[in-house]
Image: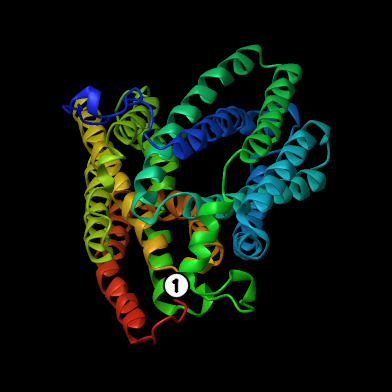
Amino acid sequence: MTAIDTADPSAAPARPPRLLHPDPIVRRLAVITMVNTLGNGLLMTLSALFLTRILGFGPAQVGIGLTAAGLCGVLASIPAGRAADRWGSKPVLITLCTLEGIGTAGYVLVHQFTAFVLLACFVTAADRGSAAVRNALYAEVLPADRRVAGRAYLRVVTNLGLGGGTLAAALALQADTRAAYVAAILVDSASFFLVAVLFTTVPVAARARAVAEAAGAPATARTRNPALRNLPFLAVTLLNAALGIQFATIEIGVPLWIAKHTEAPRVMVAGSLIVNMVFVVALQVRATKGTEDSAAAARIFARGGLLVAAACLVVGLAHGVSAWVAATLVVLGVGLQALGEIYSQAAGWALSYDLAGEGAHGAYQGVFNAGMSASMMLGPALVTTVVIGNGLLGWALLAALFAVSGLAMGPAVRWARARVAAQPAGASA
């Protein structure tokens, strides 16, 4: 929410409503994000039941298929980013959104497990590739000093869209018929086609040309991926991915811990996700303040890592106590995790842009996104085996991972800054 404008209204143009972003490009991206995440919220809520109840696959089969798809998503991010540098982020993104729409519609035709795995790999590769290219697009269309704040605003919209899609999915869940699930899947598919059309209206060319001129050389002239040769940036990517396991913690670890290892009311499973969403919507934009400088962003990232580490210890203590004590500890832990999440996300975005070469944001965002994709793929297995299987010790080990990841970001960023300072003027990052 923006501050109240006390200037003379006759001396300044009228400001848009406070809930709307002042930058028209961000507002346009927000509409696209809302359409996309409404559809994603539908499929995320229904997919497990569709695959098991309607298609008849066992949980182990679904796990194998989604793991294979996750690996494809990791592998797709880097070439998708390079494609954005070579052919432009907008045409590549439109292509990937269209392919994802086609692939999503294909789920309604699946009957065999092999076909499901192949289709899931195709859709996930398009999805993770488009995420990398979308982040590169933000670098092209948003001024450097407003990229992180813009992404924070879009993340708020993302949470609202996913929440709306989840609520809409309740209709299909209530009907619990193949026709209802198919209708929801086709709505999600249609949302990708609509997003592809909407991306054609985003004005990229002028700002992208300015970025290319500032970089000193066109991205298409680069034949090697600069991000893969930038060891400090790879270290930053790895640390961000390690802290990204917190998403598996809140989405899988906390619900399983509540249901199987505490006396907290089972409604806390939904409550924990609601608390997280409320914190993100209320505070994510504010958390970007101070991330303009990479050294400050590293300190904010460390703060986020320590908060998430503390959250793990607090949630772990909810075992073996009364129901209301357990519920209180869970709420406190989820609140700490949400604060850590918004700080670490804001700082991670800032570092992914600030430490990248201006003429190769596709390459850098592809690598950075591959790290997060790997985290999304490995996180659930890590949380369910190491954490849930070992009780408080498991939570302590996870807390140590998050704390070390956060604190190690400062040295990694200093390494990256020293590397840039040692390069000749005009050299690529």
Name the side, left or right, on which 429 lies relative to 5: right
Q: Quadrant of residue 183?
A: top right
SS under mark 1: helix
Quarter holding the N terminus is top left
Residue 373 visible in the shown view: no
Residue at 24% x, 48% y: name it.
Answer: 289
Q: Nearer the viewer, residue 289 or 313?
A: 289
Residue type, label 1:
Leu
Residue 3, image x, y percentages: 21, 30
Residue 69, image x, y percentages: 66, 52
Looking at the image, residue 425 lies above or below residue 85: below
Q: Quadrant of residue 234?
A: bottom left
Q: Residue furthest left?
A: 6
Looking at the image, residue 305 lies above or below residue 268: below
Looking at the image, residue 184 lies above or below residue 26: above
Residue 383 visible in the shown view: yes
The residue beneath circle 1 is 234
Residue at 74% x, 48% y: name it.
Answer: 117
Q: Nearer the viewer, residue 26 or 113?
A: 26
